[in-house]
Amino acid sequence: MMIPSFLRIDPATRRVSLDAGNPAFYSDPNAVYAALHANCPTFYWEEQKQWFFTGYDHVNGLLRDRRFGRQILHIATREELGLTEPDQHVANFDLAERFSLLELEPPEHTRLRTLVNRAFVSRHVEKMKPELAELANRLIDQFADKGEVELLSAFADIIPVTMIARMIGIQEEMGPQLLKWSHAYIRMYIFGRTREDEDGADRASREFSDYVKTVIAERRANPQDDLLTHMIHTEHKGQYLTDEELISTTIVLLNAGHEATVHQIGNSVRAILDSENEPRDLFKDEATTERTVEETLRICAPVHIFQRWVLEPVEIDGISFKRGDKVSLILAAANLDPTKFSDPLTFKPDRREAPNLSFGAGIHFCIGAPLARLELNVVLPILFERLPQLQIAKTPVVKDVYHFHGLDGLELAWPVK
């Protein structure tokens, strides 16, 4: 396995030097992941000052290991851990994140997830299939006779945000504004974020929260058949969600409910068109469609990393960790582990190997996975059935952020009669 020139690996010490802002890396991270698997699947990333795991069994196991968690201040103080006080210029962001499902551990996580989970189970989201198909067809109608389209802005951006807004009970006209807030908000999660990123995320958090407060007030006064009303009026063991919990939960559902799926629609279409497979063969029935979707999720996942705090002293793969350390799990690299997947860098939709880890695992398994899978299984076949001669018109540019993986745009073309 050739090691890319911009990647330095010392297998003996398991030290890796890699600039996450190098376009050669974030444009094609799979090549780097393959080199890591071949040389040191568990490694210390010098620029990030943290240990990373890429092996499938390690990532899968650590996602489920209760000695690791998404928060640590429930068992230790900042002083004990040597952590600095939070930055005041991101106070609005921290407040919005305070009760995020992604950031909590039991029992708070259990209570919040129980109240929300019912809306996202497969049998419930399955009922959305007709309106999802109607929306996809309506969007395609707007560009089908033009012979060209930028797919993200005309299709991929619109579908997930529309569907999650409908579920929660937010006006669809808010879609463009929700996208702006979300794009600014998630820049807090990228490597190498700037003060400008942080200020933008904090401003978006304040505006996003203020808007959600108004919708909560409306639902209290005028309940509807939507998820927000359900969250407001449903109790768990005698407790209702507080306004702060409602705001955090609504924001995380809106962000997670569309951001990754937008990326994945673009990633999937590109992977299919770049492969040697005939689209009509990939979507000929529900079973082949499902396998195709899972293979795109495996080979070009939209979210690459989840971090965990070490909650108690532990040794993993010969590395000793103490309470308060942080580790990172590269989901997208685990999906390419050659011990689990044959010819892992090749798009093979007929695979029957290990399940991909793109939605995580354990108690933080993506609550929106059934919705995301439904969206992909419905809209991709419709797109390729309506436009069977789709081609990539211009080499796509990958967004300059890591560890989210998506395209800046996807220019497509097809012959028009």
Image: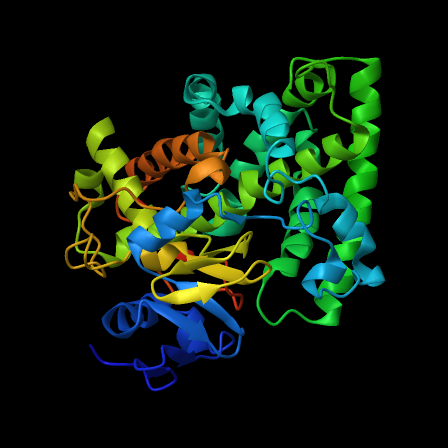
Q: Nearer the viewer, residue 320 or 339?
A: 320
Q: Is residue 397 visible?
A: no
Q: Nearer the viewer, residue 308 or 20?
A: 308
Q: Quadrant of residue 273?
A: bottom left
Seen at 52% across and 56% down, the residue is: 307
Q: Is residue 140 left or right of residue 355?
A: right
Seen at 31% across and 35% down, the residue is: 381
Q: Is residue 246 visible?
A: yes
Residue 304 coordinates in the image, percent (x, y): 44, 57
Seen at 46% across and 74% down, the residue is: 45
Residue 321 coordinates in the image, percent (x, y): 49, 63
Residue 340 coordinates in the image, percent (x, y): 20, 52
Q: Can you say whether 194 is above or below 57 in the image?
A: below
Q: Can you say whether 262 is above or below 305 in the image?
A: above
Q: Count the labels in the image.
A: 0
Quadrant assignment for the C terminus? top left
Q: Quadrant of residue 172?
A: top right
Q: Can you say whether 347 is above or below 137 in the image?
A: below
Quadrant assignment for the N terminus? bottom left
Q: Quadrant of residue 65?
A: top left
Q: Is residue 371 left or right of residue 317?
A: right
Residue 8 coordinates in the image, percent (x, y): 37, 84
